[in-house]
Amino acid sequence: MSAEAPLRPPAALLDILNGARRPLLIAHLSPDGDAIGSLLALGGILYRLGKDPILSCQDPVPPNLQFLPHTDRITAAPADEVDVVVALDSSDPSRLGDVYQRGRYSRLPLAVIDHHVTNTLFGTVHWVEPAACATAEMVYYLGETLLAPEVGPDWMANELATYILTGIVTDTRGFRTNSTNARVMALVARLVAAGAPLTTITDQVLETRTFDLIRLWGRVLQTVRLDEGVISVVNTQAMRKDLGGLVRPESLVSFLLGAQEAYIAAVFTELPDGPVECSFRARPGHDVSRLALELGGGGHPLAAGCTVKGEVEEVRHTLVERLRQC
Ligand code: 5GP
Ligand code: MN
C-alpha cells in the first residue's frame, strides 16, 4: 500500500453545490449500498449547510439497506422548484431512470459525481474519480471541504459516517477489492471512530439475504458452466415465478469468480420485460468494463454490467466468446 493523496473535489462542483438552494440528488436504479449511502450522505451534508435537498431514486431501497436512518426520505416522485440536479454513482444518464427522464430537469445544471471509469461525462460539471473505491468515499471529501469549515471537526456526527462506510463496504466487498488502499483504510478508521457501526454494516451489506434469494441461487447454479476460464449462469423468469417478484441473484457473480479455474464470471438475467441483464466480474489483469461499455453499459475493469436484447441462452453463448478475450 502506498500513501495515496486525499481526493479533491473540483472548484466548479463546489461552486454549483454552494449556490444550490433546492438540489435534487439522484442515485442509480437498482440501488446498492454505494448509491443509497452516497445519496443519504450528500443529502445530510447539504441539509446541514442550510439547503433543502431532495433525495430520489427510481427503485425502492432494498431490504438489507433499510437499517440506515432516514431511508424514508428517498422518493421516486417528481420534485418542483429544483435548481440543481446531482447524479450519484451513475455512469450514464439511463442509470438515473424515470426520475430524471420524466422530470423535465434537462435545462437545469447537472453535476455528476461518480467513480466509474466508463462515465460518459453527461452533465454540465463532472467529478469522476476512478481511483475512488466508492462514490461515498468522494462524498466524504465533499463533506470535509464544504461542511467541516462550517461546523468543525465533528461534522460527521450522527449518521453521516454510517452512510459513507456503507458505500465503502459495499463497493469494496468488505475491503477486498484492489481499490482498497491506505487512504481508504485510514478513512475507514475515522468513520468507525465517528460512530459508524462496522459490524452491523458488514452483516447487512455482505451477509444478509432472504430465503427466496438462497432458493434462487440453488436454481440458477444448476445452469453453471465453465468455458475455458469463463464461468457463467443464466437466471430465467421461469426460475423465479414463485419467488415474489425477486429478479436479481445479487452477489452470486462474485461467488462464481471464486472458482479456481475461472478468470471471468458472468450472470445473465432475463428481465421481466424481456431483455437480458449481464453482470460481469474479472480477476486482476483482465478488463470487463470495455466490453460492457461497448454493449451500452459500463462499470469498472473488474466489475461491470450491461443490458442487451436477445434470448438468454443465446446471449450467454455470444458473450462468453467475447468475455474469453477480455
Ligand atoms: P453489478 O454486476 O453489481 O450489477 O454491477 C457491477 C458494476 O457495473 C457496477 O459498478 C455498476 O454500476 C456497473 N453496471 C452494471 N450494469 C450496468 C449498466 O447497465 N449500465 C452501466 N452504465 N453500468 C452498469
Ligand atoms: Mn459505486
Image (cartoon, grey):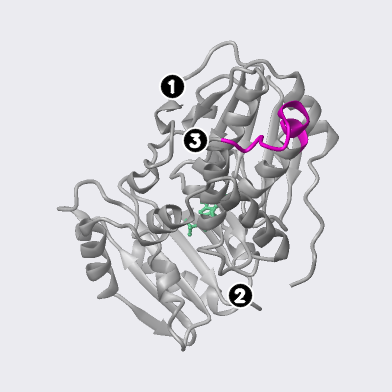
What residue is pinned by disc 2? 326
Helix, strand or loop at label 2? It is loop
Q: Which residue is mark 3?
A: 97
Q: In terms of image quadrants, where is residue 155? A: top right
Residue 153 falls inside the magenta stretch: yes
Q: Helix, strand or loop at disc 1?
A: loop
Is residue 145 toward the left or the right of residue 216 in the image?
right
Which residue occupies the foreground of this view, 25 or 146? 146
Q: Is residue 176 left or right of residue 270?
A: right
For disc 3, does the CB lie below 8 Å from ligand 1? Answer: no
Q: Quadrant of the N terminus?
A: bottom right
Read off the magenta span.
145-157
In this orientation, which residue lies closer to the viewer: 130 or 4? 4
Find residue 143 and name its label.
none
Task: Find residue 282 and report its image quarter.
Answer: bottom right
Q: Report if residue 296 is visible in the image.
A: no
- Left or right: residue 117 compared with residue 251: right
**Labelled pair 3, 2 in contact (Cβ < 8 Å):** no
Residue displayed at 59% across by 17% down = 52
Query: Does residue 204 appear left or right of residue 265 in this picture?
Result: left
Q: Report which residue position mark 1 lands on.
A: 77
Q: Specify few, some or many for label 2: CA neighbours under 10 Å numbering under 14, 14-19, or 20 or more.
A: some
* Amino acid type indicated by mark 1: Ala
